[in-house]
Image (spheres, coloured by chain):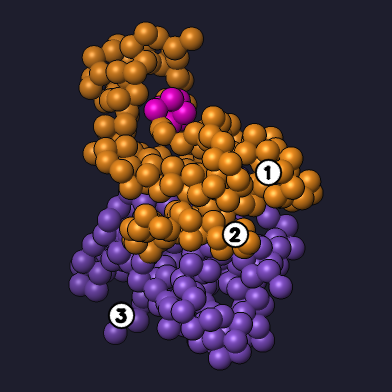
Chain colours: A orange, B purple
Amino acid sequence: MPPRNASAIFDAVLALLAERGYAGLTIEGAAARSGVNKTTIYRWWPSKAALVGAALDREMPLDLRVADAGSLAADLAALARAFLDLLTTPPAADAALAILGAAAEHPELAFHVRAFFATRLGPEHPVFARAVARNELPPAADPLLLADAVIGTIWSRVVFRGLRPDPDFPAHLTSLLLPA
Amino acid sequence: MPPRNASAIFDAVLALLAERGYAGLTIEGAAARSGVNKTTIYRWWPSKAALVGAALDREMPLDLRVADAGSLAADLAALARAFLDLLTTPPAADAALAILGAAAEHPELAFHVRAFFATRLGPEHPVFARAVARNELPPAADPLLLADAVIGTIWSRVVFRGLRPDPDFPAHLTSLLLPA
């Protein structure tokens, strides 16, 4: 289990990511900011990518594991809202954008980002199992495609287009993906 | 108009992005690699973001402007294939991933990325105008949502999931977005 001061370390990591971006973050900087000895940090997370991956996993609010909004459409809209919040709500948004953007350039970080999404949105996810049980989704459907479409469309809109989707957007997107 | 040696400069920019990422690129480095004086580069592009934006606009293959595949579904599948190629076909893919990923962290670069997508995939795009003319899309439809869904789902699959979609994927994605 991680050190007792893990949350101070993660707070420092997220603050530095927001201020300086992934390239500007160092383990030494996170140690100085959190007041934790850098050898303690290195003992738990042997690289910057591992440390950022742990901060993403522990601190970032994107979790469908306990949601059951009653229908697949409602569950997907909840995912859309959660991801939109992650990318647009300060103060975590700047760190989330820095981490997810840097995944495109840094293979070791990409490994941790994949694990983050796999844990939360994998094909064995209860949201999809419930949808199959309710006959909302055929057993052979590709639930990952729906999850990728939700996550990806929001990324494209926020990052590639610079738009701020309005509160109706999650439901609007869901109705595109799951027409009645 | 840009200098006659613009293509040598852009080649150097893309090579350096692929090797070192956005953070590792400097105008001085692009000058040294291309053999062009750095004052010449600064005269045309006053910042790294402007230079990278120009390289993206001139050198990256993502262009639907002349396509007319006969139906909106075929046009969207062609867009999906073009974007998938951009993200996965060497040598340009590493530079494309570096540029588009860095847009999440660098507001000035994000401005140029938005212009890149707006030029190629704006709401006034002939692909969407033709779809309305053919009654494939209601006049009030949001064509940008379809474009964002195509681009974004592929980004999510390739970058956030680390998957390499197979050749059927563009048509599969299109049939999710435009059920018969």
Q: Residue at x 77, y 50 (%)?
A: A138
On the same chain: label 1 and label 2? yes
Instruction: Tell me if mark 1 has few (under 14), some (14-19) or many (20+) residues whose alpha carbon lies within 10 angstroms of its own.
Output: some
Residue drawn where x is 60% and y is 45% of the image: A71
Q: In which quarter of the image is residue B120?
A: bottom left
Whether label 3 touches label 2, CB < 8 Å: no
Q: Of the residues tagged 1 and 3, which is closer to the observer? A: 1
Look at discs 1 and 2 and give the one toward the viewer. 1
Badge 3 element: loop
Q: Main secondary structure of the magenta part?
A: helix
Does residue A58 show up magenta in the picture? yes
Q: Which amino acid does label 1 sit on?
A: Ala
The residue carrying pointer 2 sits among few (fewer than 14), some (14 to 19) or many (20 or more) residues within 10 Å by Cα, namely many
Q: How many angstroms separate mark 3 from mark 2 (CA)? A: 43 Å
Q: Mark 3 lies on which chain?
A: B
Q: Which chain carries label 2?
A: A
In this figure, which residue is indicated by the disc labeled 1?
A131
Residue extent of the magenta highlight = A53-59
SS of the residue under disc 2: helix
**Residue A33 position in % (x across, y down):** 23, 22
Q: Which residue occupies 56% across, 80% down?
A: B137
Chain containing mark 1: A
**Type of the residue with mark 2:** Leu
Q: Position of residue A167 (x, y in %)?
A: 37, 55
**Mark closest to the chain's N terminus, 1 or 2:** 1
Q: Can residue B78 be seen in this view?
A: no
Residue, disc 3: B2
Left/right of residue A64 with respect to residue B177 in the rendered view: left
Q: Quadrant of residue A89?
A: top left
Vertical relation: A39 (above or below) A134: above
Q: Name the residue under label 2.
A: A177
